[in-house]
Each structure stands twice: as structure tokens, then as C-alpha cells.
Amino acid sequence: MDKKITIIGAGHVGATTALRIAEKQLGNVVLVDIVEGMPQGKALDLTEATPIEAYDVKITGTNDYQDTANSDVIIITAGIARKPGMSRDDLIATNAKIVGDVTRKATPLSPNAILVVVSNPMDAMCHVAHNISGFPTNRIVGMAGVLDAARMQTFMAEALNVSVENTHAFVLGGHGDTMVPLPRFSTIAGIPIIELLSTDKIDAIIERTRKGGAEIVNLLKTGSAYYAPASATTKMVEAIVRDKKHILPCAAYVTGQYGMKDLFIGVPVKLGKNGIEEVIELKLTEKELKDLQISGDAVQQLVDLLATIEY
């Protein structure tokens, strides 16, 4: 395997992402965590599955960041998970310190890596990773839109009793309650759902998409989602290491697009070997654009709050 992919945080999201990446043979994986023995044990368990699943991937578990040196991609999943009643925003003070610390340790060892930020509140954590690493903004991308779109696709397929393979969805904005699902750009076999579903049903899908993470948190009671987030992260990593040029909704740094500037927020991007290779500016309606800018304002409030936090 030519590519080296580091995953920081060996919890549910990190370990499941390691599994997904290994299954797709996207590169050798280094799983790093502060807890002694945990990343080593999970890496060994994953490695012992390789003969059965027939993927030739080296998986290393470690507590030493030196083992991550010269990574092509660094995925940051470290941080505390939500509990019932918590919003993603409630995690900001604790997770800013964690993301700041791991970024400070990992990025000097892999100066050419692309950072994929998963930790919540994700849009704000992209700013932390950027501020600490000093990497160009095209090499920092946040995972949210792929996950939120997948949730929307799931609910669309259920509503119409069709295969999820026929679905496509776009969800933009911050990864939180102000996210902006776009029914006009969400389709079943190329047909916009606004032509197939009533307004009430579409509104219900949008609402459930916005609360998709909280729904799982409330059901689990002791943690948050990890299967779908791991799959979404892996899809992004595949686009990068295989230079797919996939058009995906990701948190990217905008420089005036959609009337927003100097902010990481969910927008359509072209994702390839150079990270974010293009931010695609859709022609939105006045309401869609207003909703996106409201979401941007909510993210900006979190970014402003970072200025009061030492990380």
C-alpha cells in the first residue's frame, strides 16, 4: 500500500473508519489514541480479520505520534461524544482543546497531509485545525454534508419505497440544527423529490435529517452515531487518495462564495488528491441562500467563541 492514513481517536468512529478504509484497501492505517493498549488491541483485532476478508492492508495501533509520520491523510475523530440533551455546540470547549492538541502533535510530522476533521462541533473544529496546523485551506476539509445527505437519502428512499441506490441529496450549511437540506437538488433517479413528494412529507424529511444525529444519541443514551459517520469519512478519503474528483457536500473554507467569507461551512466541493480542488457555487433561490447564510451566522458565533478558549 502506497498511501498512509492516520486516524486520531480509536473510539467507535475511529475504529469503524479504520475498518472501512481497510475493507476498501485505500491505504495502510495508523490508529492512534491516548489510551494505552486500546489502539493496539483494536488494530490487532482488525488485522486478524484481514485473512478472512482478503484485504492486504497494514493496520498499526499506537500511542506514539512518531508512528504517524509522513501520512497522506490525517483523520481527526478525537473528542467527547454527545449525550442526550446535548447539542454539538455544547462540546466546543472540551473538543477545541483536544483537537488543538492532536493537531499540534500530528501535523509537523506530516506537513503535506490532508486533514479530514470529524470531531464536533465540526465546522468550528476545522478552524481549530487550520489555526494550529497553518495548512493551506484546501488541505483541511470537514466531514458532515456526506453524512447528512446520506441520512436524507435514507429517509427519501423510505418515503418512496425505492432503492437507496437511486437517491441523491445535497445538505449544505453548518453541521447542526441550522443545516440546509436542498430538496430541489435532491433526487430519485434524477427526478427532484419536489415532483414526487408532498410538501408536508418533504418538510418531515428535512426535519428528521436535521435531527438525525440527536435521534441516534437519544436512542443509544451513552454515545453517538459511528457507522454512518465512518462510512461518510471513508467516502471522502477514497475521493482524496484515488483522486476521484467527487462532487460532495463538505465543510470547506469559503472566500466569498454564497456571500460568506473566511469560514469553514458545508458547501459542494470537488474532492481529489489536492483536497478541496474547487468550491462549487449553486444558483440558490433567495430563501435557500438566506437559510444558508443564517447557518453561516450560527457557525460564525462558534468561531467567535473559539477566541475565548485556550486551545
Image (spheres, rainbow, N blue to C red):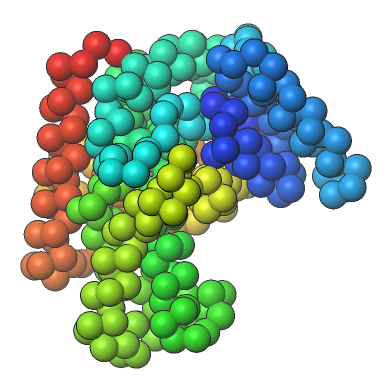
Viewer-nearest residue: 30 or 200: 200
Residue 196 can be seen, yes or no: yes
Specify the quadrant that holds the C terminus.
top left
Does residue 167 appear left or right of residue 145 in this picture? right
Query: Is any part of residue 123 visible from this angle?
Result: no
Q: Percent from the top left, x then y, of residue 165?
A: 56, 75
Residue at 63 percent of width and 36 percent of height:
15
Q: Residue furthest right?
A: 51
Is 207 placed above or below 107 here? below
Vertical side of 173 occupied by 86: above or below: above
**Where 226 sits versus 69, above or below?**
below
Q: Along the line of sight, which residue is nearer the eye, 52 or 73? A: 52
The image shows residue 9 at horizontal and vertical percentages of 54, 26
Task: Where is residue 208? Give x, y as percent.
Answer: 32, 65
Residue 156 position by quadrant:
bottom left
Q: Nearer the viewer, residue 89 or 264?
A: 89
In the picture, measured across the screen, residue 255 lies left or right of residue 267, that is: left
Count every numbered label the image shows and give the total. Answer: 0
Q: Residue at image x 34%, y 82%?
A: 193
Up/down of 20 relative to 119, above or below: below
Residue 249 screen position, x and y as percent = 38, 54
Residue at 43 percent across and 63 percent down: it is 151
- In this rendering, position of residue 118 left or right of residue 308: right
173 relative position to 69: left or right? left
- Determine the residue positioned at 18% across, 33% down: 302
Q: Quadrant of the N terminus?
A: top right
